[in-house]
Amino acid sequence: MKKIVSVILIITASLQLMYSQITKINSIESPVDYVNPLMGTDSHPGLSNGNTYPAIALPWGMNFWTPQTGKMGNGWAYTYNANKIKGFKQTHQPSPWMNDYGQFSIMPTTGELKFNEGERESWFSHKAEKVTPYYYSVYLADYNLTTEITPTERAARFRFTFPESDNSNIIIDAFDRGSYVKIIPEENKIIGYTTRNSGGVPENFKNYFVLEFDKQFEISKTFKDSVLTTSLESKSNHVGAAISFKTTKGEQVNVKVASSFISYEQAERNLKEIGNDDFDELKEKGRALWNKELSKIEVEGGTPDQFKTFYSCLYRSLLFPRKFYEIDEKGEIVHYSPYNGEVLPGYMFTDTGFWDTFRALFPFLNFMYPEMNAQMQAGLVNAYKESGWLPEWASPGLRSIMVGNNSASVVSDAYLKIGEDYKYDIETLYEALIHGANNAGPMPAVGRFGAEYYKKLGYVPNDVKIYESAARTLEYAYDDFCIYQLGKKLNKPKKEINVYKERSLNYKNLYDPEHKLMRGKNEKGEFRTPFSPFAWGGDFTEGNSWHYSWSVFHDMEGLIGLMGGKKEFTTMLDSVFSMPPVFDEKNYGGVIHEIREMQIANMGQYAHGNQPIQHMTYLYNYGGEPWKSQYWVRETMNRMYQPTPDGYCGDEDNGQTSAWYVFSAMGFYPVAPSTDEYVLGAPLFEKIILNLENGKKVVINAPKNGTDNRYIKSMQINGNEYTKNYLKYSELMKGVIINIDMDTIPNKNRGTKQKDFPYSLSNNM
């Protein structure tokens, strides 16, 4: 009998587990409760599951906060598998590879005063850690105390709950490479600055900080490099402050902290963002603000994990580029220029790499958060005026990393989508695009490295000491298309803009008909020999020819013609998934993490963990087999994303990989920014409501959606049958109701005619 009961209990438990995994939930009231800021934090340099850290911040906030488990200066500031916390760091880090700038940390302790991060660190457990975008709490076991954080855009409140102790301490670590700190006991205040950075800053760069405590200091000390002193003021390579006091059991000590890239006075002004709010009131305001932004997209009819993944990705899509401006004493917007070191009027944003984010993140902002992106465009105007160039990777100023001239896409797509509704200096931005398209910049990643070769030959050769030449050529060609599109919109002379139209076809110069793939050429026009389509690096950027051959975003019809027709084109697409994940890493001298992530994903040569191929799953729509896009997009969402610490399949990259998921869950994707179209996949949820900023709504109904029902059987827009493989931005902005009948089997008749295919330049010459 006991055995029978045990079997019944096991079966019941199994059914309950299975039920919990497939049970769908409907509408929710608080989407921020479904965000997991720890998604992607289980990473290390050799394998990225996101390479994220828990950003405790407001949307696009100037300052983020994060618990620090890594050593000072380590780009992997927080990793999920760590078990000790060294401090709570104000951070501006866009990725571990770019590292941080303007950082300092706060660490509470009890007992003997230990200021060195290796000595002061405390054991912690995720079981005693609460992480949300607007609030963080953790128990520091070695000190029997709890730390809580809640932020504003430029300030934050800390609340420390201490045990009974004669020696409760708080250490302010201003980090190395030049710092200053001063304790002002009579005001319960500490001020200071840090100059630590990872490049891309003027010589006068400082992040000034101010901390105000609600408890008097009984002991005040500073440390200077490795020496603890009784001085109230220290300046050296590495300084910090330490204050101590007695506490009773459960006593809470509150600290208000803010910083500024302009001055101490501005830091004090930024501190006023907190106002008269106590910790819990500020926390609730942060919660409300996140819910406001996240609620612009409402989803219904999905599993709990799908909800969590969706809103975690949406959260990551609303962090970068960050605000790098402040509000002065007159209430006016000003910024410290990371380009020339001056304090100037107007907007400034930073910490984004256009090579990553031109693809989905910026198109997403144009679609759902256009007012914010208009401010970002105004910031780009200032960046150009202050540096002479548009930043392809800013952190906080110009950084030389990645390839392409993708500011052309970011600027053009924005104006084509939102330029008539939001006014900013587009003429200056157009001037900046023309300048960047025709000149090499002060560093390889600014302007166009190899511009003279590209203009003369129609491609960048691979034997003139310009690395990743094929990747540059393909991206320059697309960027030229974007300039052409913007020039048309601005009514520029045809003679002027047709140059860019013609250059946008330069991708054809690298097409190798023997392999039906893109292949680097030397200055004589000879293809690279020997050639391996599986060779990463060399002529390509963090990928191989199988990844980059699809980088003809604006002219898939032209690529189809080169490949010999739609059947050959879709067969090549199929091959990406059917081939084994073999690779040739010799150009890198070892297996880089992007290679490893492709290898272990079990999706052939499809490397979703990196950006060059992320649009490829949508390309079947151009070849007349849209059901394959529906299959592979859903497959990618299911396999490559989970709301867990290992939830990404590569670097998250400033919202790009997250924005891919958000777009794909909505059922469409911007394959070619700077056109009016989004290419169809299939929605993930039974219902999605997009609350557009213009007051209109896009309602997407797919009531039969489910694990097996991933195919579009039929589709209606505003009650009319719709067979096209794309949606128009201009029509969506009017507000529409889209009804989709989902099925378990593909409809191989829908979307198969030429008139249903998305935009290609070759069809619009």
Image: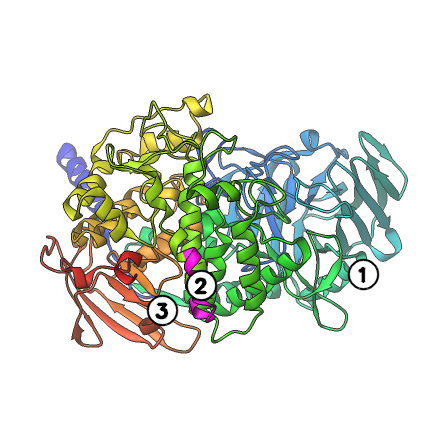
Which mark is drawn over residue 441? Answer: none
**3 and 1 marks in contact (CB < 8 Å):** no
Q: Is residue 746 visible?
A: yes
On the rendered image, what quadrant is the N terminus found in? top left
The amino acid at mark 2 is Lys
Q: Position of residue 11 (x, y in %)?
A: 17, 41
Q: Earlier in the sequence, mark 2 or mark 1?
A: 1
Give the spatial CA distance, label 3 vs label 1. Answer: 42 Å
Q: Secondary structure at mark 1?
A: helix
- By secondary structure, the bulk of the magenta-drawn segment is best described as helix
Q: Earlier in the sequence, mark 2 or mark 3?
A: 2
- Quick check: 342 above or below 277? above
The amino acid at mark 3 is Leu
Q: Which residues are magenta?
A: 486-500
Q: Secondary structure at mark 3?
A: strand
Q: In the rendered structure, does residue 552 fall within the stretch colored magenta?
A: no
Which residue does the image show at 27% across and 47% down from the upper left? Answer: 559
Judging depth in this view, the residue of 534 and 81 nearest the camera is: 534
Which tag is nearer the camera, tag 2 or tag 3?
2
Q: Position of residue 681 (x, y in %)?
A: 25, 56
Which mark is drawn over residue 495? Answer: 2
Q: Which residue is mark 1?
A: 265
Crowding around mark 3 (Cα neighbors within 10 Å: few <14, some 14 to 19, many 20+) is many
The amino acid at mark 1 is Glu
Count the labels in the image. Answer: 3
Give the spatial CA distance, label 2 vs label 3. Answer: 40 Å
Q: Is residue 35 visible?
A: no
Q: Which residue is mark 3?
A: 690
